[in-house]
Image (tube, rainbow, N blue to C red):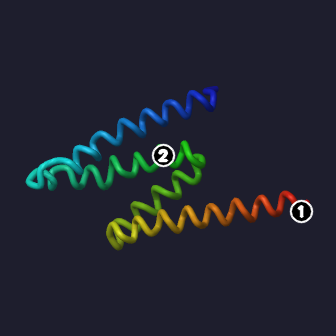
Amino acid sequence: MISNAAKRSILRWIDLGLAIPTLGYIYSPFAELPSYAAVNRFVFAPLGILAGYWIYAGVIFAIIGVAAWLGAYRLAGIGAAILSQVVLFIARKIWLAIRARQSTSQ
């Protein structure tokens, strides 16, 4: 079985590697954006979100985060996708607070 430190290291390198195409998309000339747009929005960004959230909070949170991102982006655009991530972090914080309160009361 792989250790947690090794898993974090692998995911960190994956996350950094996926940031390179995103930076290329951001800093590329405006004429080249259409060729990068779909691949970056639906492949590199979700995989970067998956790796980053997996490092931060675990695989379940990562899968929920990517599903929320893709669904909101596809249905309503980038604003809704960003808002879905904010709501997800707030919901996670509330869940952790409730869980901590329940564990101290028992």
Which numbered disc covers residue 4? none
Q: Find residue 54 and report its horizontal and vertical position in percent.
A: 54, 45
- Frontmost residue, 88 versus 2: 88
Q: Secondary structure at mark 2?
A: helix
Kind of residue indicated by mark 1: Ser
Q: Find residue 95 and report its horizontal and vertical position in percent.
A: 68, 63
Left or right: where does residue 5 sit relative to residue 34? right
The residue identified by callout 2 is: 52
Q: Secondary structure at mark 1?
A: helix
Instruction: Spot the residue most to the front.
Output: 27
- Frontmost residue, 59 versus 89: 89
Kind of residue indicated by mark 2: Gly
Q: Find residue 1 and report its horizontal and vertical position in percent.
A: 64, 26
Q: Quadrant of residue 91?
A: bottom right
Q: Is residue 2 above or below residue 37?
A: above
The residue identified by callout 1 is: 105
Pointer 2: residues within 10 angstroms few (<14), some, or many (20+)?
many
C-alpha span from label 1 to label 2: 32 Å
Q: Quadrant of residue 101?
A: bottom right
Q: Is residue 7 above or below residue 28?
A: above
Left or right: where does residue 70 sit relative to residue 103? left
Q: Is residue 42 above or below residue 51?
A: below
Q: Which numbered disc flags the more N-terminal residue, 1 or 2?
A: 2
